[in-house]
Image (cartoon, grey):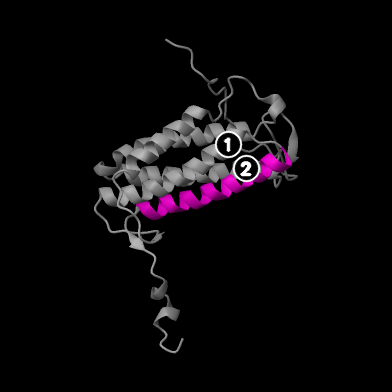
Amino acid sequence: MSESRFNEPRLALNRIYTKGGDKGETSLVGGQRTPKDSLRIECYGTVDELNSFTGMACFAAEKDAALVPLARILQRVQHELFNLGSILATLPEDVHPRQPQITAADIEQLEREIDWMNESLPMLRSFVLPGGTEINPILHVCRTVCRRAERLCVTLAREDNAPALAVQYLNRLSDAYFVWSRWANLQVKADEILWKPNAAASGHNSDS
């Protein structure tokens, strides 16, 4: 059996609350105490939020046989997001060589999946609005949360230190959520909801 690339978790979660954060601080992987509203915590906390929404999307995809390939991808992405959170919660000097983290292989796989699914999609003539199926708006929530995580990582990279691949991965992943949302609608034969500027209330006002 080949040796695993990353270290497996060594946890014993028999206590859920420790009261250690009652003063508004938490610990990084290296043991350093830091305020819970610090940029680094906000960054990997948003990645954690994204992982939760990705789980919702995965559950929705599993309900439809046509979306099973997407469910498998989303489940893998959940593991990748946890790896990303691990590395964001670690100061550069404390990173272990076999600590879970995002790699170029993760980004390349996303690119292959984006290209594969995008090939079957019709060309867009307008922007799309979330909707049409249950999973579509969930994937759009994932996309927007992913963009927020990306912005936070950009700020973290500028003001402190963040892995370069973190920003690249989130950038590619946000594009993937968009393609997946369209692909899901196509697979279940649901119409896309296109943006129509004049569908707004102001567009029906004959006096304007």
Left or right of 90 in this view: 110: left
Front residue of 198/186: it is 198
* Farthest residue, direction bottom: 207
Instruction: Give the percent coordinates (x, y) of residue 11.
Output: 57, 25
Instruction: Give the percent coordinates (x, y) of residue 125.
Output: 35, 60
Query: Label 1 is placed on what type of residue?
Result: Ala
Instruction: Give the percent coordinates (x, y) of residue 187.
Output: 26, 47
- Secondary structure at numbered mark 2: helix
**Is 109 inside the magenta-drawn segment?**
no
Q: Is residue 93 visible?
A: yes
Report the span colored magenta. Answer: 135-160
Q: Which mark is residue 166?
A: 1
Left or right of 149 in this view: 91: right
Distance from the alpha carbon under mark 2 to that under mark 1: 7 Å
Q: Residue 61 lies in what quarter of the image? A: top left
Front residue of 149/202: it is 202
Residue at the image point whose x is 67% and y is 45% from the top: 155
Residue at the image point whose x is 67% and y is 39% from the top: 157
Along the polypeptide, which appears first: circle 2 or circle 1? 2
Left or right of 89 in this view: 82: left
Image quadrant where one finds the N terminus:
top left
Which residue is label 2 attached to?
153
Query: Label 2 is placed on what type of residue?
Result: Cys
- Secondary structure at numbered mark 1: helix
**Is 138 inside the magenta-drawn segment?**
yes
Left or right of 128 in this view: 42: right
* Farthest residue, direction top: 1
Residue at the image point whose x is 48% and y is 33% from the top: 107
